[in-house]
Image (cartoon, grey):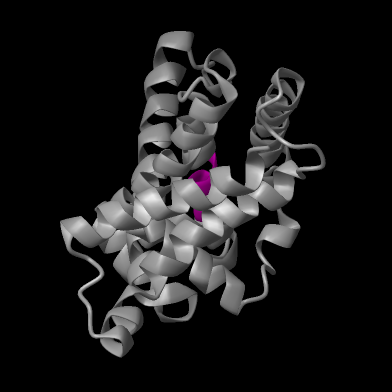
Amino acid sequence: MKPRRTQAQTEPRSRDADRSQLAILASARDEFSQRGLAGARMDSIAERAGLNKRLIYYYFGSKDDLFLAVLEGTYASIRQAEQRLHLEDVEPVEAIRRLVSFTWHYYLEHPEFITLLNSENLHRAVHLKRSERIQEMNSPLIELLDDVLDRGRRSGVFRDGIDPVQLYISIASLCYFYLSNNDTLSTIFGRDLRTPKAMAQRLSHMTDLVLGYALR
């Protein structure tokens, strides 16, 4: 008769599995962001994680499934960080300022976010379309932004008819395009758009644009 595992024996094994999966996801995020989906190699991911490659297939299946898990984790991280802004607790104008500033600095501090999205867009979002979590993860942000806009309308500072989805796409686009195209933009305009002064000007400009649209 096979001996039954005790809870004390099971918990360390579960913690080991959790640590292994987190190590794989972190390594895969780095590999995918540096080499793209096509160029990424499972051997390299295993080497980065310090684990046997078979464990990757055991926990995540294929390379495409692993890429989806990385994408879901990437979106979960930014959504969790946005929740910590507590936009519901501040005045509507300040909430919009915080969201623009947060998005800008998050993209700056997490360049892998941009490169992973670039890779997924090259594949026409085929992985995200299979996700059962992605819309559920993003809905709270839109609901929160809609609440900010509603409070602003009721207090008379924001105009009517602002779609929270369109507004968020605009905020993300203003940040994303400048950073993802910085090298080409700096070259064609003959200006270093990565200097501290240029970056500060960009944040100020984006904030003014968004509030200029939202304010009455």
In this picture, residue 46 sits left or right of residue 75 = left
* Residue at 46% from the left image edge and 23% from the top image edge: 84
Instruction: Say if residue 43 shows up in the picture.
Output: yes
| 189 part of magenta stretch | no
The answer to whether residue 24 of the structure is visible from this angle is: no
Q: Nearer the viewer, residue 182 or 57?
A: 182
Q: Quadrant of residue 138?
A: top right
In the foreground, 97 or 103:
97
Question: In the rendering, at what x and y percent does residue 8 appear?
Answer: 41, 10
Residue furthest right as drawn: 161
Q: As displayed, is residue 114 above or below residue 92?
A: below
For residue 208, side relative to residue 135 (left or right):
left
Q: Where are the magenta residues, as a range?
A: 70-76
Quadrant location, the N terminus: top right
- Residue found at x 33% / y 73%: 182
Residue 132 x, y percent position in the rendering: 74, 46
On screen, residue 174 above or below 79: below
Q: Position of residue 49 (x, y in %)?
A: 28, 53
| Residue at the image point whose x is 39% and y is 26% from the top | 15
> What is the chief secondary structure element of the magenta stretch?
helix
Residue sitting nearer the eye, 112 or 159: 159
